[in-house]
Image (cartoon, rainbow, N blue to C red):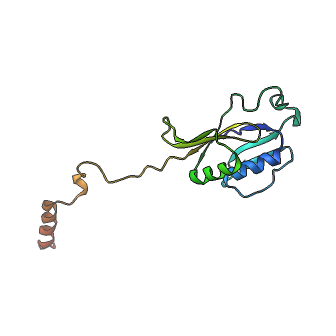
């Protein structure tokens, strides 16, 4: 398995860390460092890394003055608690960028908002698991007992066994 770590430049790592934890409904903790933090899922998967602008001299994270935060980037998260995420999002921002709707491409509900640094964040519902329902059409005859098969079994049971 290969995974990417999305790292975004932020002006205040602890503030952004708390904001994303609130959005995802995670318990409040502190980032690992004042200039870098990893938001993790309950299974330890890295969801997002927050990096203070200008720390460690990474060329693309030097300053938000070089390019506006989020230019060309869409943070897209799929959640299994969409309705609760929407409630939490409304508590974090005065107005959503996009109200909840069904995405015609994914056929899932989603909404969008901006984080404290101006990044565009889309939240999408995980699709419902596909259920294996009853078989369509005629059932497989080989799996179903028939009257003839039942008679054959009964007639075998009635026959006396020859011992030799």
Q: Whole-percent x and y of residue 108? A: 51, 43
Quarter of the picture holding the C terminus: bottom left
Residue lying furthest top: 66
Q: Is residue 93 left or right of residue 142?
A: right
Q: Quadrant of residue 110?
A: top right
Which of 160 and 42 lies nearest the eye of the viewer? Answer: 42
Residue 156 in the figure: left or right of residue 120: left
> Percent from the top left, x then y, of residue 104?
48, 36
Can see residue 80?
A: no
Q: Tell how many labels.
A: 0
Closer to the camera in the image, 149 or 46:
46
Q: Identify which residue, 40 or 9, lies in the foreground.
A: 9
Quadrant of the image occupied by residue 146: bottom left
Residue shown at the point (65%, 49%) measured from the top left: 90
Question: Residue 50 location in percent, x, y?
Answer: 78, 42
Residue pictured at 72% horizontal, 58% vertical: 27
Query: Observer-nearest residue: 42 or 157?
Result: 42
Q: Is residue 79 visible?
A: yes
Residue 78, position in %: x, y? 59, 45
Residue at 72% across, 36% down: 119
Quadrant (top left, top right, bottom left, bottom right) of the N terminus: top right
Residue 106 relative to residue 134: left or right: right
123 left or right of 149 in image? right
Determine the residue positioned at 72% across, 48% down: 20
């Amino acid at each position: 398995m290969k995974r990417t770590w999305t790292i975004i430049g932020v002006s205040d790592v602890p503030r952004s860390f708390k904001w994303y934890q609130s959005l995802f409904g995670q318990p409040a903790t502190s980032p690992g460092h004042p200039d870098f933090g990893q938001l993790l899922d309950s299974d330890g998967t890295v969801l997002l890394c927050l990096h203070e602008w200008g720390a460690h001299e990474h060329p693309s994270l030097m300053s938000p003055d070089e390019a506006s935060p989020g230019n060309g980037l869409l943070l897209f998260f799929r959640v299994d608690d969409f309705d609760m995420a929407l409630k939490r999002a409304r508590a974090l921002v005065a107005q959503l960028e996009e109200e909840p709707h069904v995405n015609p491409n994914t056929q899932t509900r989603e909404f969008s908002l901006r984080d404290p640094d101006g990044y565009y964040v889309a939240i999408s519902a995980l699709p419902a698991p596909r259920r294996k329902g009853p078989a369509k059409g005629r059932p497989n005859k080989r799996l179903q007992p028939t009257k003839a098969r039942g008679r054959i079994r009964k007639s075998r049971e009635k026959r006396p066994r020859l011992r030799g």
